[in-house]
Amino acid sequence: MNKENDPRIQGAGRFAALVAAGILLSRIFGLIRDRVFAHYFGSGDAADAFKAAFRIPNFLQNLFGEGVLSASFIPVYAGLIARGKEEEANRVAGSIAALLALLMAVLVLAGIAATPLLVAAIAPGFEGDKRDATVAMVRILFPGAGLLVMSAWCLGILNSHRKFLLPYAAPVIWNTALIVTMAFFGGSHGEYPLAVILAWGSVAGSALQLLIQLPSVLRLARGLRLFPDISLSGVKTVAVNFVPVFVSRGVVQVSAFIDELLASLLPTGAVAAFSYAQTLYLLPVSLFGMSVSAAELPVMSSAIGGADEVAAQLRARLNSGLRRIAFFIVPSAAAFLAFGDIIAGAIYQTGKFGRADAVYVWAILAGSAVGLLASTQGRLYSSAFYALRDTRTPLYFALVRVALTTLLGYLCSQRLPGLLGIATRWGVAGLTASAGIAAWIEFSLLRRGLAHRIGKTGLRPKFLLALWGAAGLGAAAGWGAKIAIGDIHPIVAAFLVLGLFGGIYLACAMLMKIPEIRGVTARLGRFIKK
């Protein structure tokens, strides 16, 4: 078969669209959740406490969850399925699930016992009621994190069977649980008691997110038995692949904790504002970076033939994926830079979250825009290394990124505001900008390292110039509209300004005949016909 006509290769775009659809749905509910949270908590002490508390057990989920299992488990399990070894695949899946469950039980109990030490390490600036509430919420949230790790195992099973929509849309039910909790209890409880109740709502949502995926998993993996059989070669391979990815994710999570620590040393509101901005930043990362990378991993892992043939297939997949990512990420970065206040206002400006808070989040978003393109494209390069069964090289480059993020983050958040003569609260924007610089360095290392394996890859300068030109024209028109409409409701402002910005960007892309616009118009056409 001509590999270019292989349905596995051709289906990558459709799989990416399914991943993006699931992520979009869950992110929409996530934004609704954050808007409700902003209404009840604003950017005060209770908001800081909950955001910091959530970060600590979330470390467990990020360390053992989706990214690690995708890189270590999916290539092995999907490979067995592709070779018709379903019985062995199910034995491997059951063993991995049993080992994960045992490990999570131990780590959750250890985390609950060590909570005061963890809070002291991640939020040393918290004192009094703020610290006590954080400790109480961390202990409640830890079991939910363990359940979400098992949910990530379900995602690995479903993705290997090319089922993408359900696992990526499953967080909708978790977000819904938090929204319902706040709506039901928000009017009758103070901020700190409500935050503790919300932590319990998060645990309930985590259980529901796992349960909604289990029926499909059990239907696809027939005869699945939860038994930790470490003698299986597939389990040993997963374990060998797991360690470097685990360490890589660990150092990245340590970096996130350091950001949280540095933010906690800034005035009240920095931790909450940083979290609000991160939610917005992760929207394009998930929709246009994670979706493409998640869909491409099983496709690139399925490349067959000699070394030159595999390299050619990977180069084609990479370049195609990079173009799709850049087509959406470039305007996203431009929107963060030019219209971050409108975006933050439309999502969060209600109740205790005011216009000044939206401007504060805008500054943090603008810093995030620095490394947005590098971070999303770097994910795809890491997936290419994983497809080559190389989990160590991305680890080494992640270590470089974390070291740079830590050093630059400290200088930009704690020292730079004083040198510039501005309020220390703006130092949180330095955290995101410095992380962007580190992301570009990591991206350059990943691209250069992969070039030695499969040849040169990357986007042509002419293509990037066209995208930035289109985004710049759209931003100029949107900025003019922003000035013209003045002070109106942020949702109306977002509809008018961002609509004009996006319309001009797409129109310019059509005039310049950028190929990726065809995929957008084709999907819109199919949607309209339906």
Image: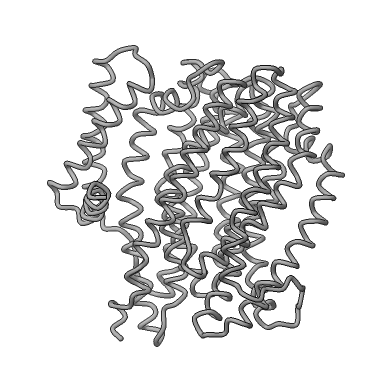
Quadrant in which the N terminus is drawn = bottom left
Q: Residue 319 appears in which quarter of the rendering?
A: bottom left
Residue lying farthest to the top in this orientation:
487
Q: For the point 60% across and 69% down, which residue is it?
A: 73
Tell me the colour scheme of the image.
one colour
**Left or right placement of residue 281 versus residue 215 in this view:** left
Residue lying farthest to the left in this orientation:
511
Q: Nearer the viewer, residue 486 or 528?
A: 528
Q: How many marks?
A: 0
Could you tell me residue 46's position as x and y percent?
69, 23
Q: For the point 29% across and 77% down, which residue is it?
A: 4
Could you tell me residue 443's position as x and y percent?
45, 55
Q: For the point 22% across and 54% down, which residue is it?
A: 522
**Left or right placement of residue 7 versus residue 42 in this view:** left
Could you tell me residue 304's position as x and y percent?
41, 83
Relative to 280, does residue 223 appear above or below in the rendering?
A: below
Relative to 77, does residue 247 appear above or below in the rendering?
A: above
Q: For the point 75% across and 45% down, which residue is it?
A: 142
Q: Nearer the viewer, residue 170 or 432?
A: 170
Q: Residue 215 appears in which quarter of the rendering?
A: bottom right
Relative to 179, does residue 511 appear above or below in the rendering?
A: below
Q: Nearer the viewer, residue 197 or 307?
A: 197
Could you tell me residue 335's position as x and y percent?
34, 34
Residue lying farthest to the right in this orientation:
113
Relative to 100, does residue 1 appear above or below in the rendering?
A: below
Q: Nearer the viewer, residue 348 or 198?
A: 198
**Left or right placement of residue 90 versus residue 332 in this view:** right
